[in-house]
Image (cartoon, grey):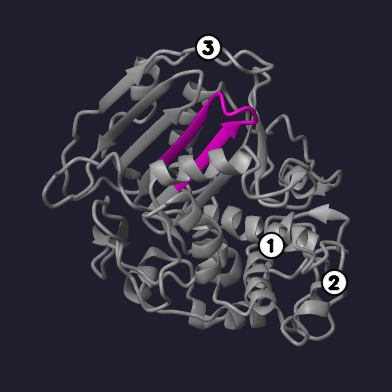
Amino acid sequence: MNSSARRTRWTILTACGALLTALATGVAAPASATASGPTRAAATVPLPGLDPAALEAAIGGLPNADVTGALLRISGRAGHWSGTSGVGNLRSHQGVPSDAHIRIGSISKVFTATIVLQLAAEHRIELDEPVQRYLPGVLPAGLPAVTVGQLLNHTSGLPRGAASPDFGDGSPEWFATNRSKSFTPQQVVDLMAGQPMQFAPGTAQQYNGMNYYVAGLLVEKITGHGFADEVRSRITRPLSLHDTYVPDADDPRLPNPHSHGYLMVKSPDGTTHPVDVTEQSPWPWAEGGMISTPADLDRFMTALFRGRFLPPAQQAELFTVPAVASFHSSQCRTEADAGRACMTMGLMRVKASNGVVVWGKTGSRPGYTSGVFSTRDLSRKIVYSLNPTNLNGTEIRYVQQIAAASFGSVVPAA
């Protein structure tokens, strides 16, 4: 596996890897929760009732070798529940703050897609026009025409990028040592030079962070403003999302309150120990570098689903999955997908085994894995955040437990 493929594990959720050794420090903190019953049913397929015991169990038993802490927030007309488990600080053993700031990773893509769709609604770009028309010289020479819409729904087929020692080997040891290292969006895009396309544009779907680095550069070129400025003026300021922002490239901080992120790192003598990686470079930017809170993510998704940001034509793109096959994608691997695409221009669709369909996005950075999902009618919304201690995706079982307790089981494809 090349370093580009390994880097992908830092921004999207995977389900592979082996268990790490037990944490050297930390004691289990009791799960804490608040709950209220449903007010009225509102879904085509009946939602399961909220079972506080099942929800507590879904995030319970922390910290352990894979995850130090977790939080879960459920809202909507079908009921409310919130809970935390584990510790937010291995030194002090303090619990996980329910209002923690989190590194949301690829959930940032929802913000990016929203802004690009707004630009389309303003007739400043066309979704079916080649991005090379708007960004001449940005993509490596020799690549075929890729439309703006194909960037957003991951049907571009763009290369994933060449291996580069500057970007590391994907190991916890490399990241712990180099977590302050930063890269510009253009440096990331340049990794595609000389690499083959994954497939002809528009013929398949493959989750690829390169699409959203290019989309972020598109936002800046068309508006003449920084991406962070556009997020602020178009989304966070109108919604009063005071805790959601795009950090400056040289700002590694995570505001209080927050849970610390840790990676288990191997020492020269073969033993492992946790390294605090809470402070890290936010270089994934429009692709995966934003910071937010559960309450802010809930408010943003509610406004987005209600059509506050987009007129009907562009709103429809949020819930339109292209009719193409999934090409080696780490995202569309549930039984309901059956090898077909599951992503839209900004969101992903997940269908539980009981028929409940939800829309949202996952995200991951070292030490942080999160997700925000909702039924289309907003009757049930969830935001979760986990603090995994590895880069292998072993926290996926907690995500599956959260999904099952919140919406019903999501069955992985064979």
Q: Residue at x 43, y 69 (%)?
A: 282
Q: CA distance from mark 2 to mark 1?
A: 14 Å
Give the residue pinned by disc 1. 116
Q: Identify the disc placed on residue 40.
A: 3
Q: Residues within 10 Å of mark 2 (few under 14, many from 20)?
A: some
Q: Examine the rendering and report whether any part of residue 271 can be seen.
A: no
Q: Main secondary structure of the magenta part?
A: strand
Q: Residues within 10 Å of mark 3 (few under 14, many from 20)?
A: few
Q: Amino acid at mark 2?
A: Pro
Secondary structure category for the residue under label 1: helix
Is residue 390 shown left or right of residue 218? left
Above or below residue 99? Residue 364 is below
Q: Residue at x 28, y 25 (%)?
A: 33
Q: Quadrant of residue 357?
A: top right
Q: Residue at x 53, y 52 (%)?
A: 107
Give the residue pinned by disc 2. 130
Residue 250 rendering spot, x and y as whole percentages: 37, 79
Residue 354 rendering spot, x and y as whole percentages: 65, 17
Residue 54 or residue 127, whichever sits in front: 127
